[in-house]
Amino acid sequence: MSEAVSTGASDKALLEAGLPLGSRCAIHRLSNGLRIVAAEVPEARQLRLVGAVGVGYLDEPTGCRGLAHLLEHGLFLGSADSPAEGEFVAWVGEQGGRYNAHTDEGVTDVHLHLPPEAADEGLRRLIDLLAHPRLDAERLAREVGVLDAEFRARLADPALHRLAALGRFFRPDHPARLCHAGHRGTLGGSPEALAARLDVFHRRHYRTERMALATLGPLPLEQQLALLERHGTRLLSGGSDPVPAAWRWSYPGALAWCPPAPTPPGAGTTLELIWPLPDAVARTYRRQLMALTARLANGHLAARLQATAALHDLIIDTAPEGTGPALALRLALEEPAPDLSDLLAVCRQAPTQCLAGPLPPPPAPPIDLDAWPRHQACRLAVDAASPADEPPLAHWLAGDRCRVLWRCEPQTNASWSTLDETGTCWRPLSLPSSLPSSSAEADPPRRPPPPLHLSPEPAPAGGPTPGCLRRDTRLTLWWGGPAWPHPTEQASWCLGWTADPAGHEARLRRWHRHTLTLRQAAASRGFTLDLASDAGGDWLMAQGDPRRIASLVEQAIAAWTTDPADRRATSPAEGLLATTLLLQLESGSVHRDARPRLLGWASGKLGPQEVARDAERFADTLAAPADLSPATAPATAEAIGETWLPPQGEERAVMLEVRGVDTSPRTRWVLKLLATCHDAAFHHEMRQRHGFGYVAAVRYREAAGWPRLGYVVQSPWASVAELNRAIDDFLLRQGEPLARLDEAGLARLKRGLLARHGAPETRREAIERTWQALRHHHVSAEPTGWMAPWEAELVVLEGLGVDDLAMTAGALADATLSRHWWYHTPATSPLPCRNALVSLGHNLPSRRHLD
């Protein structure tokens, strides 16, 4: 039995926010205490399943930090109905689906993406995984090694060091003060004792009173609720009541921090201002906080700050990582700021000044079908308490209540402390004492002029059949489409142009800085403006009011510039090495045919005459592209078919990049199918059989429309030669057998791919995919050949047979497909000579010799 959970009008609006038109949603509570929420989205391709538990790393017992994280990993090591290790992962892969999990400070969630027809079985397996994990001591011991490798890898990630520095603001007796990543040092003892402790932790916390299930997909709402209720009743109730969260914060203060490794040149600095909020305050004033966040992000604050410093970005957040409920302002500065006084003076007064006047309703949140069920499930798993009477919000957001966290370069004339566990460097900061503590004590600053001027234009009239309006060396212009089930009064403009690929990252960063206030002001008025750059050139995508969108686009391209500084070598990236390697799949030059200087596409409530007139104006506004002669190669040790990344951290990593033979839909589909066939087996081989570390994956990416696969492994102890050899060995032994499917297996994988890459789920996705097809792929000028490019692609997928996949897998195993190896070793390790790599990784017998 279940009952509908009563919600007020504001709560109902929050529940429905972020869903497309035509959606339906509902929230119920089952008789065992479990909360379930479902959303019917008719256009959705995939079914999203989420199980959330209101327990996280702050609930761990003293002396066993990392236990909640280890349990998250242990959920996938086997369960009562699927005892074999990797069985759940293999089943998800067979469906062409995806899965992941995340442990936060107060909630753990497991989320799946599956074809809709797998809903029943997917929920059954998810419930079994959550309720009855097989916590085998031997398997858990190996997983502790994985967590240890993950911890070591994250020591190169600034996000870990930020959390470590943030803990200096917390009371010494609060668990949030310590690092909870988990490693061998915190998860010691015998495997049997650890398994017993984990079992107690699971039985105490993984109970329905602290759990929630969520689904989102095309299935009827009633069917989703029935499935959730039928499977949700299998979860056990009777867990312990959650302990009220203790206030973690000590007295307000400020500190500077930096990772132990030097910051890459040109990385800039980050300044955070954090106003902590009690849980009850965050719940009571939730809608007011949303409106305040929108007001702070409307462009006016960013304009004031840019007048003080070279501000690259300003992010307003009510859920910053590691703080609990809070309001946070995050300033990304282009250059180190020797004096923070002016920035702090503006920022510390901003929240209460905004609250002094009426707050308009915030704009509707963007539609995000992946985020919606995760957000709802996690919220329901932890948000059980009723709002309480609290002081006004302005009381908690006074200037003297904020904490200041500054990431900067270590100065030689300052005394720094070092945290033993992570090596994070930190030191206290002295804040100016003359800053007012509330807006009532401060003279309100003079309001800057609006950063966005959107001139209304006449409403467009109808016109000819959608298609290509113009095609020459100056301009190619498309107009019309794509059709969508729900009508809209909005319009969209997409523009792209050639630019030097060698400097696209620096150029895009400058473009983002120049348009910060423009983008924020546009968002506050219901527009979206996305700026991007890749190997195929620079481009923008704007959506909003058809009477004003041309003005927005013109201002955005006027802010685009080229500069000789764009051609400098890119600074090494920070964070996880495997992520840095995978980014290489989306960059690099590719051979392209001659293209027009400007490519444009307009759709929605825009007429062809207005489109043609505006496109001419855009072409005149856009600055001439810089000289496109080859830029100086970056300072890396390169050879044909391999690249050594600049040293970043102390880990070893290798990625094999496999490039498709062309950009046809057939090649793209086959590589996506190969990635699906190989990913789970590759992950298991590298992690469990070789024990390299916690990062091992096969991923599909495109660079300027060119399909690529990446086989990436990261390890804290294995050599580059060992990693290289393991990848080659995997492809030789398993590459073709894993891809040699029967008709039923191939049909199952195709259904999974259709769920992930089929027809668009939202209007925004339809615009993005049509635009990228116009940029990178040959499309027909006929109306039916370009407005829905996925329709022709789906015909190609349907025609692929088992032999097509097996032949490509054989070519990959035989190394007849184009390959490129990417390597990383620490700065302290000598670069292996090419002959050593050949003997270990590139000179293995061919696939057919192994048979």
Image: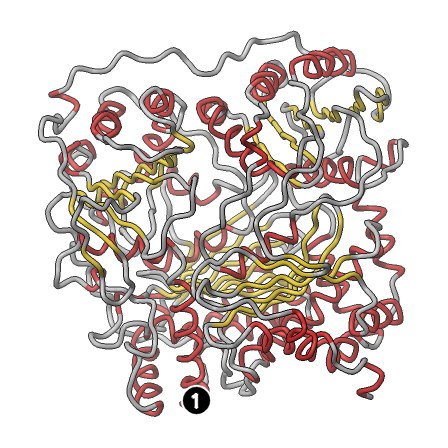
Q: Which residue is mark 1?
A: 136
Q: From the viewer's perspective, is residue 393 above or below residue 426? A: above
Q: Is residue 310 left or right of residue 47?
A: left
Mark 1 Cα-neighbour bin, 10 Å: few <14, some 14–19, many ≥20: many
Q: x, y (%) of residue 585?
A: 65, 53
Q: x, y (%) of residue 5?
A: 39, 53
In this rendering, the count of numbered labels is 1
Between residue 108 and residue 815, name the one nearer to us: 815
Residue 135, quarter of picture: bottom left
Could you tell me if residue 91 is visible in this image? no
Identify residue type, mark 1. Asp
Residue under the point 22% across and 59% down = 418
Q: x, y (%) of residue 218?
A: 64, 53
Secondary element at tag 1: loop
Q: Is residue 239 left or right of residue 96?
A: left
Residue under the point 15% across and 38% down = 401
Residue 654, quarter of picture: bottom right
Residue under the point 56% across and 38% down = 505
State which quarter of the image contains the N terminus. bottom left
Could you tell me if residue 289 is visible in this image? yes
